[in-house]
Image (cartoon, helix red, strand yellow):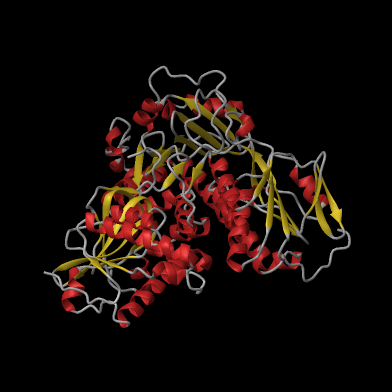
Amino acid sequence: MSGAQPLGLILRDGSRVGIVGGGPAGSLTAYFLLTFAQRVGLDLGVDIYEPRDFTTAGPGGCNMCGGIVSESLVQAMAMEGIDLPPTVVQRGLDSYVLHTDRRRVRVDTPLGEKRIAAVHRGGGPRDVLAVKWGGLDGHLLNLAQDRGAKVAAARVAEVGWDGGRPQIRLKTTVRTYDLVVGASGVNSAGWQLFEQLGVRGTRPRTTKAYITELHLGDDAVSGLFGTSMHMFLLDIPRLDCAAIIPKGDYLTVCLLGQDIDRELVTAFFESPVVRRCFPAGWQVEEGACHCSPKINVGAASRPFADRVVLVGDCGVTRLYKDGIGAAYRTAKAAAGTAIFRGVAAGDFRHHYWPTYRAIARDNAFGRLIFALVHGVKAFPPLLRGTLAMAADEHLASGPARRMSIVLWDTFTGSAPYREIFFRTLDPRFVGRLLWHSARAWNGAADTTGRYEGAKEAGHG
Amino acid sequence: MDKGALGREYASGDVICHQGEAGDRMYVIQAGEVEVLREVGKAEVLVGRLAAGDVFGEMAIIERQPRSATVRARGPARVLTLDKRAFLTRVHEDPSLAYRILESMSQRIRRLDEEVARLQLGEGTPGPDTEEAGYLLVVARKPADLCDRLARTLGTPEVRVLLDRRNGERRRSGQAPGAPERRQGERRRRVADEVLRSHGLVLIPRGASVPRSK
């Protein structure tokens, strides 16, 4: 970078912050910057650059995501005073159903509360007839605007420096800022801009996911999938995780793994386990809204420079789950650092980097857990033992629901992977799993909860 | 219940948590209103009402004491629960999450301080009888606000209202009000008096002794 003072870079009255990207990471950064500034009596100006209109249906207003706000994020946002109203949440989820080739098991939230929010990120799929719900991204952007952020519907094409301060250059205007926040995700060319602003190190490592929106109508979605997130543990190569998330009139199908391609997608929909979830003869509609977005599976190595910081997916996110939660955590940590500490690279290294690194390190445990899941899938008695143990815990409560909690946290992203991993090392957990697996080996544990016993899964 | 509604729904009158029970969770109101009731002897005293966005039940978690009040839904209400362990873990990781709770406690302490000062000044010293009578203190700057709050919060006929008429003036900059302000203030007070009487409430002017309940 040119001419910036390496030390003593702080935001003062009248300072301006430019945020590139108005998804959850950008909007929440603006929200927290302005909230913290208000608390300390700092007059701060925040501009968000977001070319998409999140009120429109289809790709023009979509941020390509499964659209789950995890239990832990719902609770954290509630504590922050950030409301997720029914005009945004299409379906509150109170359980998940785990499907395997032989049986399915349902695990409920404590107290039967709806603690997970199923949302669309924009106005909905491209074939939506009427936009009935607001998207999450538009909602968070509105919250940031209510706090005083200004939104410019423009794509940032170029950046530069002006006397030690970063500049954002649009076609007709140039604006100089005291801090530029990169929140452009991994599906845009934002990284080139941030490299021009002095961010060095490796870019995030990505892989492709597959997301499709299937229109079934409200009644069919409610009747077939209820208020549960449906997770599938199928023996399909390269597939780490598959989910069907019921929303308003649509189902969102989300496939995660290595190099998801058409062959893998076809194998998923043709799997008997998946077909059982749909009416006989149902087929994926030709032309259904779908996308193959890049997802971040490896953090960028250095997400900051003097007066520049990266938040959300363009830096780090949680492996496969709770990306919006990672956006929230990084946005808040970056905003707190900028307001209370400073905007020099050293400030971000000392006060933002620990939060960022914690997410990246936790993903190492995530990879370990998904490797274990692959191992369990490949060894049927262990898989049946896992499900039998979860089914057995149905009437238990609290810590006694060891397997249910592990599965819940793994598939909903409600707890750090590290915490989940160490819970699986508990001797009582291991002992009960081995006991159930041994019974499954002898065929005893498979006497309940087969597919014909749909009550166990308890749709709706 | 709306499909997109988060939390758990309570019908009007449902008790969300009981005074005296162990507090192993706290709550955030998502929609509707709840009333906070303190049981004093056999009487039940309304000590507050909370609305969407408000947090309750945090005192029992922080102090590790039994719950200090019962909370009941006032009309249909939707409430999200936060487990004690999850709450404490998150606050440990991100202490700023507790800021709103501190803010709410600070406001509560400020209100209590004002009330204590008022009582110390003789503006109605509660004896054992008056405490059980369940007085509702209404502080409002404008008659319209007062009417609105009364309409929303009026309880049983036993509830009486202590109206601090000076409140509007006290909040001003300290300068004596001019003639137009005085006239406007008098008009507002007359409207407020009429509203109170129409609701069958006892109006207790500042400085007068507080009548005892039946």
Total labels drawn:
0
Name the residue rendered at 75%, 64% in the picture.
Answer: A345
Along the viewing direction, whichever of A356 and A364 lies nearer the viewer: A356
Residue A310 percent across, percent down from the top left: 70, 54
Q: Quadrant of the C terminus of chain A?
A: top left
Along the viewing direction, whichever of B199 and A162 lies nearer the viewer: B199
Along the viewing direction, whichever of B68 and A97 lies nearer the viewer: B68
In the picture, measured across the screen, residue A453 lies left or right of residue A428, that is left
View extreme (left): residue: B214
Looking at the rendering, which quadrant does residue A122 occupy? top right
Q: Quadrant of the N terminus of chain A?
A: bottom right
Residue B149 percent across, percent down from the top left: 33, 56
Above-or-below relation of A371 to B184: above
| Residue B26 shows up from this direction | no
Residue A358 percent across, percent down from the top left: 60, 61
Residue A360 percent across, percent down from the top left: 62, 56
Along the viewing direction, whichever of A283 and B84 lies nearer the viewer: B84
| Residue A458 shows up from this direction | yes
